[in-house]
Amino acid sequence: MAERTSKKNGGAPAGDGRYVFGERQGMARLVEELERRRKEAKYTFDQLAEMTRFHRGYLHRVHRGQSMGSYEVMAALDKVYGTTHLARVWELSSQGRFEHYFQRFSELEVEAIFRIDYNASVIPGLYQVEGYTRELMQTAEWRSDEEVDELVSHRMRRARLFDREPPVLCRVILDEVALLRAQGDQPSWGEQLDHLVECAERPNVTMQILPLRSRFNFFVGGGFALLELPGGEAVVNKEGAGLGNLIEEPEEVAKERVAYDYLRDTALSPVESLELLRKLKKEYSDGLTADGLVRVAKVKPLRHRVSQLPGSLRRARGRRPRT
């Protein structure tokens, strides 16, 4: 009987018939086991398609290692093959298929006790609903439907961080640009606004809105996420158009944190931000026409609303961080 192997050695059969997958070879081992089990069961891909409700061509590519698959297809194959571990192994192994910087960041965000998020043009990933994420992923015209499904599934699983115990403390700044950009799938945009309000009401989340009237900032044109870890270390993930960079040097992380502090001081307060989110949600609902399209004119930019806020916030344009 084969002995169970450690995570570091690349993976090997465990004594109970399961595989223990290493960090580097996990996906390759998973592909091997999928094809072995299919041949032992003597299933054709047409039969698998009928049992799982996934397209035979997609299942063929998954079993050949030509597609990384998804959590959902692995869960379906678990039922077909009478196993209980394929979906979990896929979840652990799939990280190796992402860029190294993001693989490392994904591992660290599970451990983080505090995080900060901001993106200059879209809603940060952890705060997206499935429809919003799907529309973003489909902007890359070269992606197949299966690849879009895989990316959406991965992002939705990352959002489970909100449900862990103890909850991670979160700060997030939403740019007004992301809140006013028209979405093709209008029902999903309504769901997205509902979700943002729900997130802002969570006791572990502090959400602020950055108005259009704010000046250029250090993060314009990209995204930013900072994690603080239990040992006191901190890392930053910087993202642009298809690019990313993980920053771990303490001096560089400190610079990113200072830039964020400037940004935060020009944003609306959490209370005012939540109020404005609720207003956007109501205006969106009131602006629906019979065919489901939004009358964009009803959703006024926040700069028109800022004039109704306290003077200290109206003067935020040139304000420097408090010391």
Image: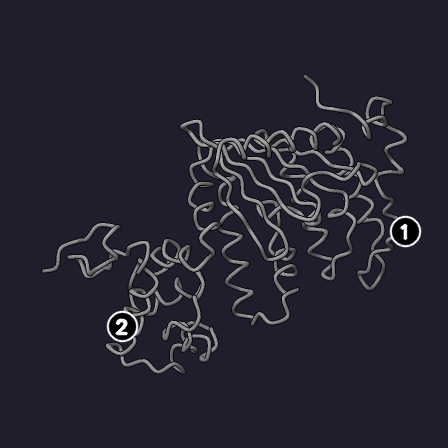
Mark 2 → mark 1, Cα distance in angstroms: 57 Å
Image spot of residue 193 (x, y percent): 71, 46
* Closer to the camera in the image, 304 or 244: 244
Quick one: 85 or 125, which is closer to the camera?
125
Between residue 238 and residue 25, name the one nearer to us: 238
Q: Residue furthest left?
A: 1
Marked residue nearer the N-terminal end (2 or 1): 2
Residue at image mark 2: 37
Mark count:
2
Left or right? Give the position of 177 relative to 52: right
Quick one: 95 or 55, which is closer to the camera? 95
Q: Can you give x and y, in whole percent of width and height, for residue 101 in the image?
A: 47, 50
Can residue 167 be seen from the camera position used here? no
Horizontal arrangement in the rendering, residue 316 relative to residue 68 (left or right): right
Location of residue 234 with respect to 220 vertically, above or below: above
Q: Is residue 307 above or below residue 48?
A: above
Q: Residue at x 34, y 57 (%)?
A: 89
Dividing the picture into quadrants, the one containing residue 314 is: top right
Q: Residue at x 63, y 36 (%)?
A: 172
Residue position for label 1? 297
Q: Residue at x 32, y 66 (%)?
A: 28
Residue 222 appears in the rendering: yes
Look at the image and tell me in which quarter the C terminus lies: top right
